[in-house]
Image (cartoon, helix red, strand yellow):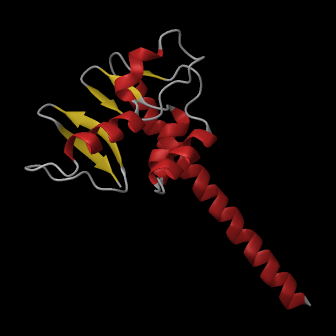
Amino acid sequence: MSNEITNIMSLAEKLEKLEKLEKLEKLEKLEKLEKLEKLENFECRKIKGALQLQIENLEEKFKITLPEPYKFFLEQYGFCLWLGGSVKGLVPLEDEYEDDEDFKDDDVVKATKYYHQRYDNKDGYQSVPQYGLVIKSYDGGGYYFLF
């Protein structure tokens, strides 16, 4: 019996250490994101980032599992843009902004669909990978892809 108690206590200690490590990792991510917020003209969703349901729908729609850091980004910001840069994500819900057209170019769903339509099965172009998301575009028609 005392061996079982020792095993349970050992497992409890390991679980506590794991929880502390997860909290530390989350703190480190938050610190990095706080630096991002200080960039000139930084903007993101005004009300908390994307809802968990929206993230799940995104994964289901494209039949992917998003990396944890990108999920964390979506939960915190939804999407973001700043002077000279942006990361596409889940744009505001209709009731968050009077004119959600301002952010249509920052929608990861619309961007991914656009690049599939533009490049898939076209002569002279490499098709967009089936499983993943376009999270940023750049001049000349290129894009950054997360998969």
- Residue 18 or residue 134, whichever sits in front: 134
Q: How many marks?
A: 0
Residue 103 x/y as whole percent: 40, 21
Q: Which quarter of the rendered picture does the N terminus lie within?
A: bottom right
Task: Give me the residue at 52% from left, 24% from top.
Answer: 92
Task: Give me the residue at 74% from left, 77% from top.
Answer: 10
Residue 2 x/y as whole percent: 89, 88
* Figure check: 88 above or below 69: above
Residue 36 x/y as whole percent: 39, 30
Which of the 4 quarters of the picture holds residue 112?
Answer: top left
Q: Is residue 108 left or right of residue 65?
A: left
- Residue 37 or residue 65, whichever sits in front: 65
Which of the 4 quarters of the picture holds residue 5?
Answer: bottom right
Residue that sits furthest to the top in the current view? 98
- Residue 33 or residue 123, whichever sits in front: 123
Residue that sits furthest to the right in the current view? 1
Q: Is residue 126 left or right of residue 47?
A: left
Is residue 38 something one can see in this rendering? no
Residue 7 x/y as whole percent: 78, 83
Task: Give me the residue at 40% from left, 15% from top.
Answer: 102
Q: Is residue 116 left or right of residue 138?
A: right
Q: Is residue 45 left or right of residue 134?
A: right
* Figure check: 146 above or below 137: below
Q: Which quarter of the rendered picture does the C terminus lie within?
A: bottom left
Is residue 42 something one can see in this rendering? yes
